[in-house]
Structure formats: C-alpha cells, structure tokens
Amino acid sequence: MNDIMLQFKIHSSPDRVYQAITTSAGISNWWTRDAVLDARAGGIGIFGFNEHQFIIDVRVGALEKNKRLAFDEVKSSHGGFDGTSISFELDGDSTHTTLKFSHRGFKSAEAMPGITTRWAYYLYSLKKYLEEGTGTPNPNDSDVWSG
C-alpha cells in the first residue's frame, strides 16, 4: 500500500483548525466550495470538484474535538481513492497547531505525485485561510492544475 503523510504548523488554535476541517462552511474556505459534511461518527461527506467532474465521498470514522478527524471509508468518482482512509491529527495550544495529515491505502503508486501535490496545496490553503483569512479552495484553484 502507498500512503501520503504531510505535516503543517498553523498559527491558529486547535479549536479553529478543528472547525475548519469538520464543518461544511470551514471546508468551503480551503478545500472545495462544494462541500457537505455531517461531522459525527458515521456521518457522510460529499465533496465536489470542477462542477462535479470529480467527487469524493467519505464516512466519518473517528471524531475527537480539537484533536482528530478520520474518514475511514473514502470513495471517488474516478475510483482512485476507493478503499483509502484520511486522517487529520491536531496538537497545539491557544496560538498554534501542528496538523498531521495522512491519506493511506492507495493500491497503486501511479497517481501519488499528483495527489500528494494537491493535498499539499489544499493544506497550505487551510493554513492561509486560518492565518490570513483567505484560502484557495476549488474552484478558485482552477488555474493551478493542468490537464
């Protein structure tokens, strides 16, 4: 199996980071404007990209306020995310948070460079949103990707 693991230091409290990753409103400011998430254990999330040309469906597996969010059932419209899991681990204090991100269980390494680049871009967008007030979620990111 192939995994993506990234770590970011965000100058914002774990509570603010948690709100940004566990609410539809928060997610729409850094990942995709087309976001619906029922943030409770067993809840469902649907994230659309480029006018629903690409869709990611998730099920919330673990949720610990200001500490952890995990999606344990991930599927995508193109199949590349099927059978993977995503987690966000938070650690910090009132002024900063260390975010440890993982997207695990890819069956093939072929798409890993592109997926890793996109996750790094979106997590940097999360950092910008929390530190500067504006992220670059889809579709605002459309000029970044080619092909």
Image: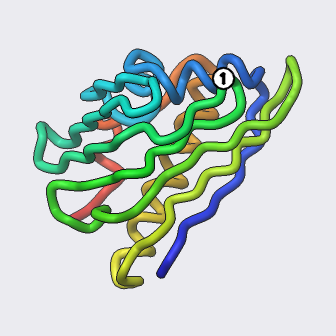
Q: Against 72, is 146 above or below? A: below
Frontmost residue, 58 versus 25: 58
In the figure, is residue 128 to the left or right of 45? right
In the rendered image, is residue 139 in sight?
no
Q: Against 106, is 123 above or below? A: above
The residue that appears at 45% across and 45% down in the rendered structure is: 71
Q: Quadrant of the C terminus?
A: bottom left
Q: Which residue is mark 1?
A: 65
The residue that appears at 39% across and 33% down in the rendered structure is: 42
What is the crowding at mark 1: few (fewer than 14 residues within 10 Å), some, or many (at least 20)? Answer: few
Count up the numbered dots: 1
Residue 143 point in image, percent of width and height = 30, 47
Image quarter of residue 118:
bottom left
Residue 97 point in image, percent of width and height = 78, 33
Frontmost residue, 137 versus 59: 59
In the figure, is residue 51 to the left or right of 114? left
Q: How is the image coloured?
A: rainbow
Residue at the front extreme of this rendering: 42
The residue that appears at 54% across and 23% down in the rendered structure is: 20
Frontmost residue, 58 versus 30: 58
Amino acid carrying mark 1 in the image:
Lys
Residue 134 point in image, percent of width and height = 52, 22
SS assignment at label 1: loop
